[in-house]
Image (tube, rainbow, N blue to C red):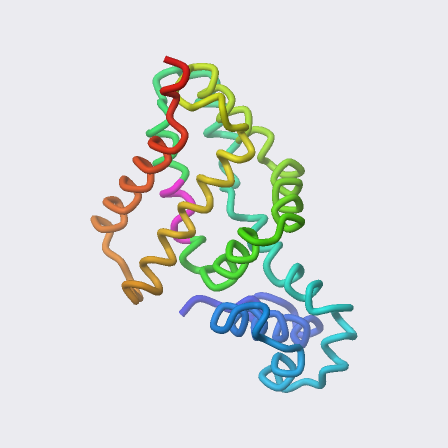
Amino acid sequence: MNPTFSQKLSKADNTKAKIIDTAITLFSEKGYENVSTKEIAKKSFVSEGTIFRYFNTKSQLLHDAIFPIASQILPTEVDRVTSEVLSNNNLNFTDFLTLFYNDRYQYVWEHFNALKVFFSRLLFNPQMKRDFLKMLSDKEVPTFIDVIEEYQRNHELTNLVNAEEIITGIITQFVFLIVKEKIIEDNTTISDNKRNDEISKIVRNINTLYGGTDDV
C-alpha cells in the first residue's frame, strides 16, 4: 500500500496532514462544493476550529491539499529530456511525449484522488487555471515550454495554440486516462501491455489535437 500524505510527514505535522488527507478523499468522492469543513473535521477526528487554525478558508485548504501534488506532475528529469530534444533532432514529439507519460504514470496513479479534484476544479475555475500556469512557469517548466516551442518551430505541433495551453492539454489528457482506468474500469492494477496501449492512444489524441497540420 502506498503511504498517504500524512504518513510521509513528521508527527508535529500529523494533524494538518490528516486534515489534508481527509479533505482530498472527501473532495474526490463527493466534489469540492458538496463537502463542508464540518464534515472534514468530523472525519479527521478534530474540531472545525482546528481546521481553521491551519487553513483560513476551505478554499485555502483545497489549495494547500492539491497544489503541492500538482506541482510535481512534471518529471524532475524534464531538463535532461529537454536537453536531448534541443540537441537531438532524432527525438520526435511522439517519442518525447511517450517518455514523459511513462515517467509520470506511477506518480499520477498514486496521487489520483488529489489530481482528480485538481483538474475538475481547473476546468471551471479560471483563477485556479491561472495559478496552475503560473506554478508551471515558476518551476522546471520553462524548459518544458522550450521543448514544445521547438516542436512548434519544427512544425510537429501547431502554432495556433500557445505552449502553456498545449502543456495543460498534455497533462489533462493524462489525468483523464487515469480517471478512466481508476473510476470507469475500476482497476486496482494495470498490466504493462495495457498501460503502453493506453499511453499510445493518448499520444495519438494529443497529436490529433495539437499536430502541426496548420504549418504544412
Name the outermost residue toward the left.
Answer: 193
Relative side of 31 to 102, left or right:
right
Relative side of 58 to 23, left or right:
right
Relative side of 195 to 58, left or right:
left
Q: Residue at x 30, y 67 (%)?
A: 186
Q: How many marks?
A: 0
- Give 85 or 116, whichever is nearer the viewer: 116
* The residue stretch that appears in magenta: 101-106
- Give 120 or 94, whichever is nearer the viewer: 120
Residue 167, how many percent across, how many down?
A: 50, 36
Quadrant location, the C terminus: top left
Q: Residue at x 63, y 48 (%)?
A: 126
Residue 103 colored magenta? yes
Q: Which secondary structure class fits the magenta region best?
A: helix
Residue 9, how many percent across, how many down?
A: 62, 67
Relative side of 205 to 62, left or right:
left
Residue 181, how many percent across, how many down?
A: 31, 59
Residue 183 colored magenta? no
Residue 190, how many percent across, how many down?
A: 26, 58
Quadrant location, the N terminus: bottom left
